[in-house]
Image: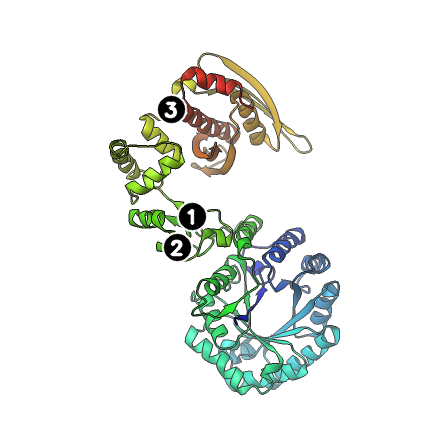
Amino acid sequence: MKENISIFDTTLRDGEQSPGCSMNPKEKLKMARQLEALNVDIIEAGFPIASEGDFEAVKEIAMTVKGPTIAALSRATQVDIDRAFEALQYASKPRIHTFVATSDIHLKYKLKKTREEVLEQSIRAVEHAKQLTDDVEFSCEDASRTDLDYLCRVIEAVIEAGATVVNLPDTVGYAIPVEYGDLIRTIRQRVKNFDKAILSVHCHNDLGLAVANSIAAVLNGARQVECTINGIGERAGNASLEEFVMALRTRPDALPFQTGINTEEIYKSSRLLSSLTGMMVQRNKAIVGANAFSHEAGIHQDGVIKSRMTYEIMTPESVGIKHSTLVLGKHSGRHALKKRFEELGYSLSAEELDTVYQEFTRLADKKKEILDDDLIAILNNETENDEFSYMLTSLQVMTGTGVRSTAVLEMSDGKQTYVDSATGDGPVDAAYKAIERITKMNGQLVDYTINSVTWGGDAVGEVFVKVIFNDVVFTGHAASTDIVTGSVEAYLQAVNRAISARAAKMPGEELIKNQANAV
């Protein structure tokens, strides 16, 4: 039977300490609810003594989130511990997490205290916390650089004082897996009352070893792992929750452990955190990066088409991603190209595929990624169908604080002029809705990016959009000193490309009739 590993999520405490990742109480509560859906065992909600905002966030989470244990951090002082419990008292399962540094480096330069003074402080802190709640965690900050004999003394003393969890952080990411595993094993062997507490680990990623160290610790007896979504945290971050959890799930042969994590909520949790903090994950980030389940090399694509097991050790669905992606680029082969055309509704003969593939490879040498509208343009041997293209001739918008934005558009297809208006959440949204009313093309905007290409207040802004029409992605691009105008022209380009694609599939009269009857 697999042993259970408790997941202690510190995204809202240590993770939030990552530069640029601060969240207000409302945002922290939203993230905490998602962590509850993810089914983490413990949520470290914050550091209540640090600020009034952090106190309120911990209090609100304690009152609202009832599934996981709610923990709050405190230094090993009575005032910190009291403040932590003041916020935690509303939790159905509160935990006070108190800590003090134990390495000689920290004692000498930061605390300016002796080992005996810190030992006594640790005992007093745990005893006081124990009077407030049964669940008390104690952390030996910088444990991986602490003298082993002294570390064992501190651990034994705080367990005797009532600590239910003892955490041994690799605070500065200094350890390597073999020595960190040895440390955990040695602690188990030398601390007499070890069996009275859960051993926890908290690893930082300064050398890129946080997850590896966490796994080494678990293999040697640790039964709680402290981690964060997307691996955010101080400096290079913490152990990544998604990487640790999926390592256990993917390699049960080597790691006979389990967690209670609902892995299908992983991707959603990652995206939510990115949207709240603005810190996006790198494309090649394990598990949740944009490239994690993407394949461009032709040999890999051919293998995945035949059996996903050839190049995917876990399914994208297992972490909440709908499907893997075959990225079409200069390394792609005929099999992937043919499959994507079939998904777009085009069945190509071998001769047609050869012809299209030659044009595809020429274009792939110029572009990093080939999108659906590029493929359709290659097939049609043209980029636009002027017969059904719209042009923006006039745009007026009204927006401001406390009013709903309105856009009035005038467009022409070369034969007729169209005028319509719409309201929306901002001028761009209103303008897009007006375009939909005129063209009868209702799309789903999936990407909207603005880049400044020049300097100053009159800088030219480049707008890129990706829009889905009938399950096909179309792109648009425009540049303008007026961002709203550029946004409209970019969206209109995507609309025109979608119409051009439809025109290639049906006669002109049928297309016009189809557009006129569209909802």
296 to the left or right of 125: left
Tag of residue 384:
3
In the picture of the structure, the residue carrying the numbered disc 2 is: 312
Q: Distance between the residues labelled 1 and 2?
A: 9 Å
SS assignment at label 2: loop
- Amino acid identity at mark 3: Glu
Please say whether residue 19 is visible from this viewpoint.
Answer: yes
Helix, strand or loop under label 1: loop
Amino acid type, label 2: Glu
Residue 316 rendering spot, x and y as whole percentages: 46, 51
Residue 199 vs 304, above or below: the answer is below
Label 1, residues with CA under 10 Å away: few <14, some 14-19, many ≥20: some
Say which of 487 and 418 sits in front. Answer: 418
Seen from the viewer's position, the closer of residues 357 and 428 is 357
Q: Which amino acid does label 1 sit on?
A: Ser
Which residue is rendered at x = 75% and y = 76% of the image? Answer: 131
Whether tag 1 and tag 2 are in contact, CB under 8 A, the answer is: yes
Q: Label 1 belongs to which residue? A: 324
Q: Say what secondary structure mark 3 lies in.
A: loop
Q: Position of residue 209 (x, y in %)?
A: 44, 67
